[in-house]
Amino acid sequence: MIAQVYFGLFALVAVLCGATLVFARHPLNGAMALVGAMVSLSGIYALIQSPFLATLQVLVYAGAIMMLVVFVIMVLNTAKDSKTPGIDLVGILMSVVAFAFGLVFTGVLARTPVEARADSPRGTVQAIADTLFPVHGQSAWPLLFLAVGLVLLTAIVGAVLLSKRRLESPISVEDHA
Amino acid sequence: MHSPLLWLLPVLPLLGFLVNGILSLSTARTSHGPSRGLSGFVAVLFPALSFGLSLWLFQRLSHDAASIHETNVNLGLHLSEVVRYVQPLWSWFSVGDANVGFGFAYDALTGIMLLFITGIGTLIHLYSLGYMAHDRGHARFLAYLSLFLANMIVLVLGDGPLVTFLGWEGVGLCSYLLIGFWHEDLANGAAARKAFLVNRVGDLGFLLGLFFLWQILGPTVPFTYQGISEWFRDPAHLAMVGQGSVAALLTASTLLLFLGCTGKSAQIPLLTWLPDAMAGPTPVSALIHAATMVTSGVFLLGRMSDVFVAAPFTMHVIAVIGAATALWAAVTGFVQTDIKKVLAYSTVSQLGYMFLAVGVGAFDAGLFHVFTHAFFKAVLFLGAGSVIHALGGEQDMRRMGGLARKLPLTFAAMFAGWYAITGLPGGAGFWSKDLILEKTWMHGGWALYVVAIFTAVLTAVYMTRLMILVFWSPSRVDPEVEHHVHESPWSMALPLVILGLGSLGAGFAWASLVPGVDWFARTLAPVVGPAQDLLAGPEAHHPPVALLLALGLMAAFGGIVLSFVLFRSGSYRETESGELPFLSRFWTLLFDHLHAVVAVWPVLVVSWILDKVLNPLLFGLVRLVGYLVEVFGWLFRALQFSRLRLNMGLSASGALLVLLGYILVKELLK
Amino acid sequence: MEISIVHLQLLAAVLFALGLAAALGRRNLFFVLMGVELMLNAANLSFLAWSRTFPGRSALDGQVAPLFVIAVAAAEACVGLAMLMSVFRNRESLDTDDFSRMKE
């Protein structure tokens, strides 16, 4: 029972934070709202037997990634979204699309009979490590793990190249000057 | 026997390399460059430590060998046991069921090689202090030299062919770096690249040879020299590799390994790089391109003697190639005007002698010549360096002469080297060359002997010519330069003196005419003895020693007299432009022309075809793709909104529609 | 008492829709990026929720997938923010409606 109360609380916070993200004027407010949503999602993860993911959610997502976003927002200090209207015609149209998406999902879900199983294992570090790096038997996960490592490496190189002050190639055109 | 100290041998010069490398890098932007005293001290200290260590190890080895020999004699056994110190360090790599370890092994052959590598290496480090004193990059130079020494030690100390290969590549790299040391001159860079590329061909042969050998041995035999030797010494295995496809495989393997040796040791067909390598500073020529690195081919053959004797065809090839190279290079040395070029071709020629000896099955004689040659060729090069230093960089012998009085010490040292290389009685070359001639007579047949003795005559001729042109003839030195001629500093003089004495005395390590003076042969016997006995069989007849000795001496004296007759005046026919006459030039560049026909032209033809035919085709394809993209882009652009959000939103709506459609279809079909 | 899977999925759907609304509706690039992050989070939640309906080891696949989503999200944020900075430096604007050179 207490779990459901917590779930309700976390869900409420998450949805409120999500709504704040949609309506916030300043990106910093949006980012803070997103952090809130992520932390409450982390709580929900912990409630549904995924302690490892809950930890990672706080460490990597809310911690590292959002820190980066906030940092960049602060670096580009002029980013206050005052020139553009928060909601315009296209925005409303898009919100309708998003709402329709949610509606369809909800509709499908409402008609799907699903039941949590009691014998589903907990997502502990041990269990996830055993799945990710199986000592016995074959699995695609280790290969994917390597691939993700490559993706991250590429991202680092790409980010360094992109954020250099000026690319030394004739393609980069300074057209604002 | 296990020895925990072997790893120090290569690591000490490596430390020298690191210190000097850091010194060189950290002071690269200062105006003075690194402190000469500090870098010089470091550069001499570490090789000297390595030399001390190898002296100590060798002394211990001799002691152990003697005590084991004594035990065997007491037990009535006639075994020549190999005393070997090993130090397996770590597992290098394992592929499938093949495990290759990284380790060092020290036996008599390695010991002797190490003695003169580290000894002469130390002396040449010392010499370089004086020679490179005025060069801005002397710390870098000393660093490279130390790195070379470390790699050379790895080469001879490796416990298996793969570790040797590591050192083999390492010395190739250092050779490249040092030939191109004065890289502001593009010609030096070209010479360095040439050395590197020609060596690559040989290295490929080395690697392929190792693969073939692996194929023969299989993964169960440990791929170390010990394992390979023991496998090949087993009569059952010898019978197996003597026939059928295994014999062909072994012949291919040994021929490929020998190709590697011809690359490193500048034999036909891969010899063109060594004369060009003289572009490097003279200490480099002395250490790398005369005394140590170029002899690693002979060392490898000695190391794998048990493998090579199992392939008689390869042995014939080695002997013939060695003799041919010796003759060709001696003739070439005869027409050169550059003092270092003469010595370079002389080195090629002497290396030919070594391979001839190995080819006729006299591994110990070949290695003995490696040993003596290291001394007298090093002193000749260092002496030449001293002359060049004194003349302010002049290398052309036509503008030398009369230097005997001006540079007495250099002259004395070079005289010792000359005395040794021409084979005058008592010099180092006398003993080793005589031994090779004798073995050639016994096992190689008269044709090889004639070539060898003719080469000996030529050697005496061109070396005497060098001495006449540089020291004995009237001076042709530019008066402006002559004014500044000076004897070298002590750091250059000391190595000259030591090596000069060495080139007079080193031959007594194995004075075959004097009974009992065969220290060298006795020490090496456990390593290469079994292979030699296998090839030679029981000695049926004794060679006519007196006749051969007389012939050898006649060759030396005849050559010297001939040379005095020809070049007494110090002037000789030359074209005015300073170029060599056409015939000499053609002969000198014979193998360069051959390389051009065999390797360079095909590459040029193929690249021309690629450039003129394939390139436009590919470019057309690329342009076509680009054009198609442009056309389609133009078409699809008409479908886009300029508002990003609208585009994205419509995509999302599309996805939604697909989802809805899927659900609907599923519902309807239910 | 377990939390019902349907509730979890509903929450995921709602968050996904909110993220989509932020990503599509807002004109500021920061909000677009953060909307995408929120959508990824919703997908993660959905993964975890579904994994509760499987028995034994196969459930753990659902626990591992979010791990990769997080890793890719990190890469995406890294590159996305770098692009954002470079765009801002060149155009002095973060408004998506300003970026229409491909069409012109």
Image (spheres, grey):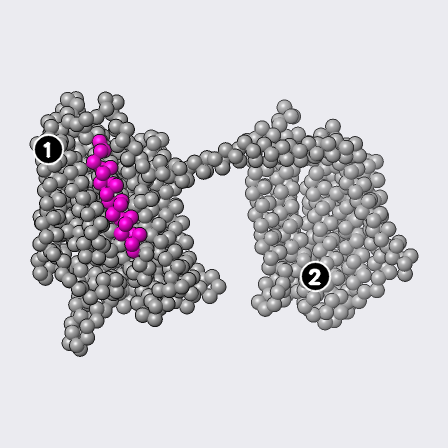
Return the mark for residue B565: 1
As drawn, is B552 to the left or to the right of C19? left
Magenta residues, dominant SS class: helix
Q: Which residue lies under the disc numbered 2?
A: C62
Residue B2 in the image: state x and y as whole percent: 29, 67
| Whole-number angstrom distance, CA of label 2 to CA of label 1 | 96 Å
Name the residue nearer the viewer: B32 or B534: B534
As drawn, is B48 to the left or to the right of A18? left
Q: Secondary structure at mark 2?
A: helix
Q: Amino acid at mark 1?
A: Val
Name the residue nearer the viewer: B89 or B428: B428
Span highlighted in magenta in the image:
B315-337
User: Is A42 colored magenta in this rendering?
Assistant: no
- The quarter of the image holding the C terminus of chain B is bottom right
The reply to whether dot 2 and dot 1 touch (C-beta < 8 Å) is: no
Q: Residue at x 43, y 60 (%)?
A: B93
Name the residue nearer the viewer: B208 or B645: B208
